Image: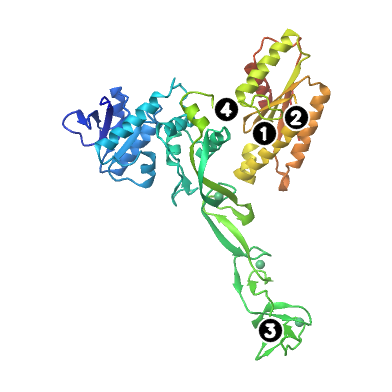
Amino acid sequence: MDASHELVILSQTRPRCAQLVVAGCTAHCHGDYGEFRQSGLSPGAFIVKSDDPVYIRDSLQQLRRDPDHATALAFIDGAVDDVDLAVSDGKLPATSQVLLEHLEQWRSRSRAIRGRNDNRRPDAMLLEYMWLRPDFVLEPLAQWQHARRYRYPVLEALDRSDSDPDTWLQRLDKAGLIERTALRDRQRECDYCSSAHLSFIDVCPNCRSIEIDQHTALHCFTCGLIAPEQRFMRGDQRQCPKCGTRLRHIGSDYDRPLETNVCSSCDHVFVEGEVEARCAVCRHSMPTTRLRLRKIHAWRLSSTGCLAAQGDAPGQTPMLFEPRQYLPWPHFLGSLEWSLKMTRHGSTAGFAVAALHLENLEQLNRTLGVGRTADLLEACAERLRESLAEVDLAVRADLETIFLLLPGADRKRLAALHRTMQQLTAQAMQENAVGPAWRLAEHSLTARNARNEDARGLLQRLRASLSGDGADRQVA
Ligand SMILES: [Zn+2]
Ligand SMILES: [Zn+2]
Ligand SMILES: [Zn+2]
């Protein structure tokens, strides 16, 4: 067995020598992560040792956020909570034999990574992290203190920005790089802020007051009044407070209705209250049908993901020109570049590029909630896709921007695009006239006006014309 492994021990209580031999490995001791960084070492594993859980947490967070070492093994020697444990590789193995096995595995897997590229984006790091640990399963962790209850601590630690880790899990899933191993839970979440901290309250279906109570009610057959029983009592007799009829016999004068709830704010009598969900985080109320269902899965690398983590395969499956699909960004850019060359060369009559920009994402998120807004935009993008011709190409540059490449598009085609966008906008309109507002800019290219501009330059020019209030037209 190779005994040349290097370890780093992070510990506040410094041993007398800076270097030890542990399980036949050279172990370098450092007081904290910053001090280790100055050493220039690149060990395969860290051991974080402390009686102080905060020290362990801080050290792990610094390690996982450092693109140079984020995927290294990290064992804990000390007491920590579940979240910190999930960010590490667990407790320090009981025997040096087991520790060595981990190190060997990690090293042979890391050797398989050819050209560990300079792509240190969090999703690339996650793939690498998963690849370096055989049979790794990314498990959700339930924690009641967390707004969404379920979290993936490793994801949060690797993500060096404020982006939503769930979004990049979905992106990796769509690209076929990770796959679900098991469904761990289903939960309902607030439609506005995605929190899982909801309470459920019965309210009056008429005025939505919470002042409702159970009553025994009576139903007068003469006038049809349904009201709480005490309103019918006149001494020890029953008399209808509305029509004055004496109620003597149940079954012929009156009966006891099913409506046994009464609202003390509006006197409404009803069978069952309506259940309303209230979010403890953003304080919105919503009918339970508006709650979003979130499925919480455990994930593992797919076989494509394994290849991608080793530096093979760009990650996307090569569905180059499936008609009427949103293309991956590099494919769209490449096609645009090629079309520009063809047009300049005089090989084609030309084409048009259109850019669609959503002007009111923030307003939509505020009024409709993030979840409903995302659904609405997804539906818009889907209908737009269906309206495309076989030769058209499209890309979603970001949540707010779509670019279209329309070969041979003339004025008629562009006018049709404007009509489509108007229809989409009308269809997407929600209550209170809230809906997506799209701005549309287009540019037609022919052999005469196709300058020596490249694809990126052209798209940038379109984007710029969308953000100003220049010659572009606003739809709806
Ligand atoms: Zn009421
Ligand atoms: Zn009556
Ligand atoms: Zn909320």
Cα separation, mark 3 vs mark 1, equals: 60 Å
- Inspect the image, locate mark 2, and give the three-letter code of the amino acid beneath it: Leu
Determine which residue is flagged by label 4: 316
As measured in the structure, the alpha-carbon distance from the residue carrying label 4 to the one carrying label 2 is 23 Å
Residue beneath disc 1: 359
Q: Which residue is mark 3?
A: 232
Instruction: Tell me if I can see residue 163 in this picture.
Output: yes
Answer with mark 4 or mark 2, whichever residue precedes in sequence. Answer: 4
Q: Few, some or many C-alpha atoms within 10 Å of disc 4 (few <14, some 14-19, many ≥20)?
A: some
Tally the numbered discs.
4
Q: Secondary structure at mark 1?
A: loop
Which comes before the other along the chain, label 2 or label 3?
A: 3
Check if mark 4's residue and mark 2's residue have beta carbons within 8 Å. Answer: no
Mark 1 vs 2, N-terminal side = 1
On screen, residue 427 above or below 246: above
Residue that extends furthest to the top in the rendered view of this protein: 345
- State the residue lying farthest toward the left: 16
* Disc 4 and disc 3 in contact, CB within 8 angstroms: no
Disc 4 on helix, strand or loop?
loop
Q: Is mark 3 within 8 Å of ligand 2?
A: no
Give the amino acid type for the residue marked by disc 3 in the picture.
Phe
Image quarter hosting the C terminus: top right
- Residue at the front extreme, as displayed: 1
Q: Nearer the viewer, mark 4 or mark 3?
A: 4
Mark 3 or mark 1: whose residue is earlier in sequence: 3
Disc 2 target residue? 388
Q: Residue at x 31, y 27 (%)?
A: 43
Q: Amino acid at mark 1?
A: Glu
Q: Residue at x 58, y 50 (%)?
A: 293
